[in-house]
Image (cartoon, rainbow, N blue to C red):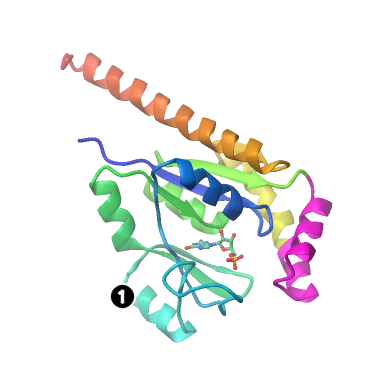
Amino acid sequence: MNKGMLIVLSGPSGSGKGTVLKKFLEENDFKVSISATSREPRENEIDGVNYFFKLREEFEEMIENDDFFEYAMFNGNYYGTPKEYVLKELEKGNDVILEIEVQGAMQVKSIVPDCVLIFMTTPNINILKERLIGRNTESMEVIEQRLNTALAEVDYINCYDYLIINDDVDIAVRDLKDAIKNAKAKVAKNNNFIKYFKGEI
Ligand code: 5GP
């Protein structure tokens, strides 16, 4: 059995990647890893659903125990992908999606070079600012911090396999679907060739 495909989705906070991913998952069967974070829960966020919310010390203990597939410090908080779930699902042959920021994505790329990296963003920084303000979940200080982070994050776009501009949610969902379909077709074609080359088919 082929192992599952690991898909990494990154993009600035406020780019709408969470909304797009949620819509995508309504129609497509993928496993999604739930991250751990030391950030405070937002209103409506549920422990074990949105994140595993940890105290900073608890997160650091998990780092010590080598519990993370990848982790990063983002705007003063830890975020990390618990190792066990991802490895188990990939081993079972299931496709797994990680919604993580760029530092973590680069770590994943070095551990699993054949992962698929997808970057999603708003058409420009002004729209990102409007969305972050409209979301009304962070203070202006945190929003400014996230905008500065976004300016640094877009410099990584060339390290990604696909870029999706999220101007319209439905189009972005379709683009995400197409990118994954495309990546899967490439892997299937390559695997077929490998078998053919070895004389197995
Ligand atoms: P937020 O605080 O808005 O939920 O997330 C902030 C950023 O952390 C987002 O870009 C999100 O994709 C990223 N993030 C969420 N979980 C993880 C994770 O497990 N690892 C890393 N490296 N980034 C994460």
**As shown in the figure, which amino acid type bears the numbered disc 1?**
Asn
On the rendered structure, is 8 left or right of 17? left
Q: Which residue lies at the image location 47% right of the left edge and 84% below the top edge?
A: 55
Percent across and percent down for residue 119 are 60, 44
Residue 122 magenta: no
Q: Nearer the viewer, residue 7 or 135?
A: 135
Query: Is residue 57 depicted above or below 87 in this figure?
Result: below
Q: Quadrant of the C terminus?
A: top left
Q: Quadrant of the N terminus?
A: top left
Q: Which residue lies at the image location 51% right of the left edge and 77% below the top edge?
A: 38
Q: Secondary structure at mark 1?
A: loop
Query: Is residue 55 depicted above or below 5 in this figure?
Result: below
Q: Nearer the viewer, residue 118 or 112?
A: 118
Find ligand 1 in the image and state its quadrant.
bottom right
Q: Range of the magenta residues?
A: 124-147
Task: Report which residue position mark 1 lands on.
Answer: 65
Percent across and percent down for residue 58 are 41, 83
Residue 136 magenta: yes
Cβ of mark 1 under 8 A from ligand 1? no
Please identify the residue farthest to the right as the structure is shown. Answer: 126
Q: Dot 1, crowdedness within 10 Å: few (<14), some or many (≥20)?
A: few
On the rendered structure, is 14 left or right of 45? right
Query: Is residue 150 depicted above or below 72 in this figure?
Result: above
